[in-house]
């Protein structure tokens, strides 16, 4: 189910919005972090969790348009990130988004 995110995660800045979608059967949560501000921001997201999880940063693919076709210029990648004390450190350029996948261990 869709969570009221402020009960699950605390943002570090008013221009940084966080939403979470949880799939209980798979024991996974997709976290969307958006910087709606006009400046780059960095800080920690603090999660209210009762279980141990691992965090995976999802780097979205990048595309260019050439001859009215989408050309993939950078493939999607995943990388495990530190999740010490239920916190993730993020750095977001202005008007950008970042996805994380949280998986119960």
Image (spheres, rainbow, N blue to C red):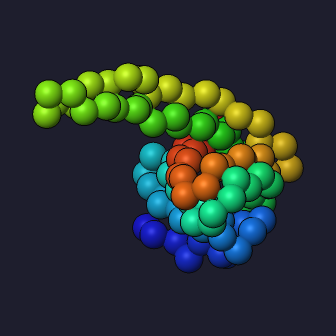
Could you tell whether 102 is left or right of 21 in the image? right
Could you tell whether 66 is left or right of 59 in the image? left
Compared to 21, does 42 lie above or below? above
The quadrant in which the C terminus is found is: top right
Residue 94 placement (x, y as % from top left)? 61, 55
Residue 90 placement (x, y as % from top left)? 72, 47
Regarding residue 14, the answer to whether it shows in the image is: yes
Picture quadrant of residue 19: bottom right
Picture quadrant of residue 38: bottom right
Could you tell whether 46 is left or right of 2 in the image? right
Residue most toward the right?
85
- Give the camera-side residue of 54 and 43: 43
What residue lies at 26% left-to-right and 25% top-to-bottom?
Answer: 71
Picture quadrant of residue 74: top left
Residue most toward the front?
67
- Give the camera-side residue of 18 and 72: 72
Regarding residue 10, the answer to whether it shows in the image is: no
What residue lies at 43% left-to-right and 67% top-to-bottom?
Answer: 1
Count of marks placed on residues: 0
What residue lies at 77% left-to-right and 42% top-to-bottom?
Answer: 83
Residue 34 placement (x, y as % from top left)? 56, 59
């Amino acid at each position: 189910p869709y969570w009221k995110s402020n009960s699950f995660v605390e943002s570090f800045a008013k221009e940084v919005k966080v939403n979470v979608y949880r799939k209980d059967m798979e024991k996974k949560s997709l976290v969307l972090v958006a910087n709606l501000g006009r400046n780059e921001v960095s800080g920690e997201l603090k999660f209210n969790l009762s279980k141990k999880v691992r965090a995976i940063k999802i780097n979205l693919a990048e595309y260019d348009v050439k001859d009215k076709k989408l050309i993939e210029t950078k493939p999607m990648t995943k990388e495990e990130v530190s999740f010490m004390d239920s916190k993730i450190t993020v750095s977001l350029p202005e008007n950008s988004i970042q996805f994380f996948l949280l998986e119960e261990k």
